[in-house]
Amino acid sequence: QKEVEQNSGPLSVPEGAIASLNCTYSDRGSQSFFWYRQYSGKSPELIMFIYSNGDKEDGRFTAQLNKASQYVSLLIRDSQPSDSATYLCAVNRGGYQKVTFGTGTKLQVIP
Amino acid sequence: DAGVIQSPRHEVTEMGQEVTLRCKPISGHDYLFWYRQTMMRGLELLIYFNNNVPIDDSGMPEDRFSAKMPNASFSTLKIQPSEPRDSAVYFCASRPGKANYGYTFGSGTRLTVV
C-alpha cells in the first residue's frame, strides 16, 4: 500500500463547477497535510495546509480532513481554466520533518 | 526574496559523466530537501539537511548519488557516474525550522542522461 494515494485523473470539470480532489494516507501517525499545485513544467507551490479534523477555507479553496478515515480532500469552488494543473497531496508524520507526496491528480477545467 | 534558486535549469550529459546540481535555499530556512520527480514514481525524497547537517539520506538511490551542504546558503547533489535512468527533474526545497510549514520549491533541474 502506498503511503499517500491519489487518483491520477484526469479529472475534468466545467468552468464554474466545484472540483473535488481526494487523497488517502496509510500512516495513522500523520499530523500535517498539504496540498500543492503544479503547473506543467513548473515546480510545486503550496496552496493549503491543514492539521485539524474538519474544514479549512481559503478563498475558493477548502481543505477537508478526516483522520479517522485517513482521508483528506481539496475542494475548488468556481473552477477556472487557470486552475488546470496537477494537485499533489503531501503528508507529514508528527515529529518527522520529511513529507511524503502522492503522485498527484491532474485537473482539467473546461471553458 | 528570490526564493529557492537552482542551477542549471537543464542539463544534458552522456552516460558515465559526472553531474552536479546546485541549490541556494531561502535565507533563514533551516531545512533543505532534495527531491526527484519522474512520471512513474512522482516526487521522491532523496535527502534532507537541518542546519547544514544531513539528517536522512535513505532515499538516495545508490552510492552514485551524494549530497553536501557546506554552508547555510548552498547545497549540491552530485551523480557520478550518471546513467540514463537518472533522467528526471530534480527539485530542491527549503522551509523554516518551525514545524508544520510547507516547503518552497526551486524551479528544478531537468536532467537528461543520454
Image (tube, rainbow, N blue to C red):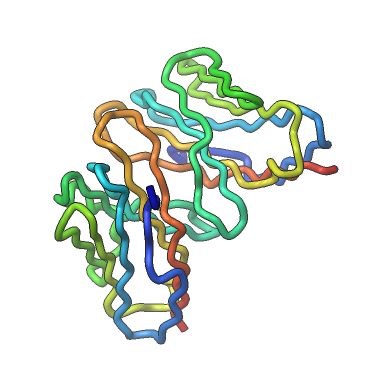
User: Residue B1, how many percent across, how many down?
Assistant: 38, 47
Would residue A41 appear left or right of A10 to someone viewing this image?
A: left
Q: Which of A90 and A45 is in front in this view?
A: A45
Q: Residue furthest front?
A: B1
Name the residue nearer the viewer: B20 or B3. Answer: B3
Give residue A82's position: percent from left, percent from top: 71, 44
Give the total number of marks visible in the rendering.
Answer: 0
Residue at the top extreme of this rendering: A54
Tell me what residue is drawn at x 39 percent, y 27 percent.
A32
Instruction: Tell which of B92 and B18 is nearer to you.
Output: B92
Percent coordinates x, y for residue A97 in the rendering: 28, 37
Horizontal arrangement in the rendering, residue B22 relative to residue A82 (left or right): left
**B19 is higher (above) or lower (below) than A70:** below
At horizontal 71% and vertical 46% (from top left) the residue drawn is A10
**In the image, what residue occupies the spot 42% across and 20% down?**
A51
* Residue B90 found in image quarter: bottom left
Residue at point 37%, 53% (across, down): B4
Task: Give how far across and how far down residue A87 sits, in percent.
Answer: 59, 41
From what the image shows, is residue B3 above or below residue B96? Answer: below
